[in-house]
Amino acid sequence: QVQLVESGGGLVQPGGSLRLSCEASGSLFSIADMGWYRQAPGKQRELVATIARGGSTAYADSVKGRFTISRDDAKNTVYLQMNNLKPEDTAVYYCRAARPAFGVDYWGRGTLVTVSS
């Protein structure tokens, strides 16, 4: 059974840092492009960052220069390092594994990040 399990969320003050982790089960990680998305209260889910199987990355303009996505293929894990957090970064963060050509599109259950003083 395919699973994506996120961890690392929590409460942090503005300007602080958090690192989110997403561990994928099975052979999913080796064939999927990975991404982090977020959904703030009352808003639509939005892309935060993606990392392809080959390592190329892309970021939303709102997080460029503050967030870094990376993957450890040996651990089947993708990370999101979040620095200089702002209150507007408050959201539930979701991990996604996708490879449309293979019919792959899985989501984790999410981890809550709250940025508040």
Image (tube, rainbow, N blue to C red):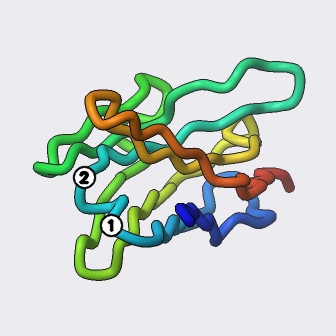
Give the Cα distance between marks 2 and 1. 7 Å
- Numbered label tally: 2
Using residue 86 as the reference point, say whether residue 75 is left or right of it. left
Q: Nearer the viewer, residue 109 or 67?
A: 109
Which element is circle 2 on?
A: helix
Is mark 2 in CB contact (under 8 Å) with mark 1?
yes
- Label 1, on which residue? 27
Residue 117 pos. (x, y %):
86, 55
Instruction: Check residue 88 in the rendering and tell me which mark sits there, or answer none.
Output: none
Neighbours of disc 2 within 10 Å: few (<14), some (14-19), many (20+)? some
As drawn, the residue found furthest toward the bottom would be 75
Using residue 75 as the reference point, say whether residue 41 is left or right of it. right
Using residue 26 as the reference point, say whether residue 108 is left or right of it. right
Residue 20 pos. (x, y %):
55, 64
Q: Nearer the viewer, residue 38 or 115?
A: 38
Q: Nearer the viewer, residue 26 or 115?
A: 26
Please state, as top left, top right, bottom left or bottom right, where the N terminus lies in the image: bottom right
Rendered residue at 30%/48% (across/down):
32
Residue 92 pos. (x, y %):
75, 45
Residue 98 pos. (x, y %):
39, 39
Which element is circle 1 on?
A: loop
Rendered residue at 30%/44% (across/down):
33
Rendered residue at 39%/63% (across/down):
78
Using residue 39 as the reference point, say whether residue 17 is left or right of it. left
- In the rendered view, tell whether residue 27 sits above or below residue 63: below
Amino acid carrying mark 2 in the image: Ile
- In the rendered view, tell whether residue 58 sits above or below residue 73: above
Instruction: Check residue 31 in the rendering and tell me which mark sits there, or answer none.
Output: 2
- Residue 44: image quadrant is top right
Rendered residue at 80%/64% (across/down):
11
Neighbours of disc 1 within 10 Å: few (<14), some (14-19), many (20+)? few
Amino acid carrying mark 1 in the image: Ser
